[in-house]
């Protein structure tokens, strides 16, 4: 379904928000990646569950390298 609603940017605290019209099927708490395109349009891309569960490779490497030290320090 295509929507052509005009939405107004609102300020809430330090953030700017765009509302999601009722007819668009999204769940509360669902996460999106936002991209501002070169033509200044904004695209919201759903974040896949598998994408959220992935650990950054640099962080995984750090945890592997320092796991013995972290284990040693955890009970101090």
Image (tube, grey):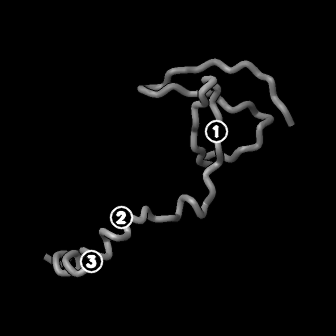
Percent x, y for residue 61? 34, 70
> Which residue occupies the extreme front position in the image?
38
Q: Is mark 2 on a helix, strand or loop?
A: helix
Q: Camera-side residue: 69 or 76?
A: 69
Q: In which quarter of the image is the N terminus?
A: top right
Q: Are marks 1 and 2 in contact (CB under 8 Å)?
A: no
Residue at position x 63%, y 57% from top? 48
* Badge 3 or badge 2: first in the primary sequence: 2
Q: What element carries label 3?
A: helix
- Mark 1 Cα shell of 10 Å, populated few (<14), some (14-19), many (≥20): few
* Left or right placement of residue 6 versus residue 54 in this view: right
Q: Is mark 1 on a helix, strand or loop?
A: strand
Q: Which mark is residue 44?
A: 1
Residue with the mark numbered 3: 67
- When the figure is inspected, residue 30 is found, relative to residue 38, above or below; the finding is below
Q: Residue 59 carries which label?
A: 2
Percent x, y for residue 27? 68, 47
* Badge 1 or badge 2: first in the primary sequence: 1
Residue at position x 60%, y 23% from top? 40
* Left or right placement of residue 35 versus residue 26 in this view: left
- Mark 3 Cα shell of 10 Å, populated few (<14), some (14-19), many (≥20): few
* Left or right placement of residue 20 versus residue 23 in this view: left
Residue at position x 42%, y 65% from top? 57
- Mark 2 Cα shell of 10 Å, populated few (<14), some (14-19), many (≥20): few
- When the figure is inspected, residue 20 is found, relative to residue 55, above or below; the finding is above
The image quarter containing residue 9 is top right
Residue at position x 23%, y 81% from top? 68
Q: Camera-side residue: 55 or 19?
A: 55
Percent x, y for residue 31? 59, 48
* Left or right placement of residue 30 versus residue 6 in this view: left
Percent x, y for residue 29? 59, 48
């Amino acid at each position: 379904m295509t929507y052509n609603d005009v939405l107004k940017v609102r300020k809430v605290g330090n953030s700017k928000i765009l509302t999601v019209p009722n007819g668009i099927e999204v769940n509360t708490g669902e996460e999106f990646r936002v991209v501002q395109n070169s033509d200044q349009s904004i695209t919201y891309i759903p974040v896949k569950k598998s994408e959220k569960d992935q650990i950054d490779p640099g962080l995984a490497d750090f945890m592997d390298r320092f796991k013995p030290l972290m284990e040693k320090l955890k009970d101090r």
